[in-house]
Amino acid sequence: MTEKPPRHDDSGGFLSSNLARAGEHFAAKDREDEDNVTRWATRIGRMLSLVAFIGLAWYFGHQLKWW
């Protein structure tokens, strides 16, 4: 199977290409074409991990009295 070129190689700078890559990651576009249930489960799992990361960052910042 040939590998597709990434869509985030547009000339827009370092930040925009990383944001585009993160958007594709959370939309599960980096997965092979599978059934819709698997794709949505991947999207939900990745979004829950992002929410958990933000929650832990807030909790640790609160414990260290950064805010």
Image (tube, rainbow, N blue to C red):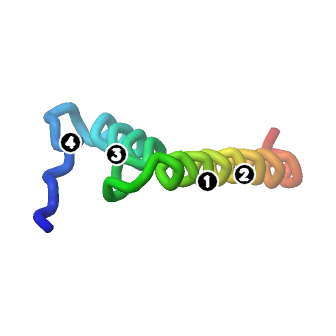
In the rendered structure, which disc, 3 or 2, sits on the residue that comes first in sequence? Answer: 3
- Label 4: which secondary element: loop
Circle 3 residues within 10 Å: few <14, some 14–19, many ≥20: some
Residue located 88% across and 53% down the image: 63
Residue that label 4 marks:
7
In the rendered structure, are the residues bearing label 3 and label 2 in contact, judged by CB atoms less than 8 Å apart? no
Mark 1, Cα crowd under 10 Å, few <14 / some 14-19 / many 20+, is: few
Which one is in front, 34 or 45? 34
Instruction: Indicate the secondary structure of the residue bearing disc 1.
Output: helix
Q: CA distance from mark 1 to mark 4?
A: 23 Å
Horizontal side of residue 15 vs 4, given as left or right: right
Q: Which mark is residue 45?
A: 1
Q: Are circles 4 and 2 on residues that touch, CB within 8 Å? A: no
Residue 20 appears in which quarter of the rendering? top left
* Residue linked to disc 3: 21
Q: Do residues under tags 4 and 3 come within 8 Å of each other at their CB atoms?
A: no
Indicate the amino acid at tag 4: Arg
Lower position in the chain sequence, tag 1 or tag 4: 4
Residue drawn where x is 81% and y is 38% of the image: 67
Q: Earlier in the sequence, mark 2 or mark 1?
A: 1
Q: Is residue 65 left or right of residue 34?
A: right
Image location (x, y in percent) of residue 4: 15, 54
For label 2, the residue is 52
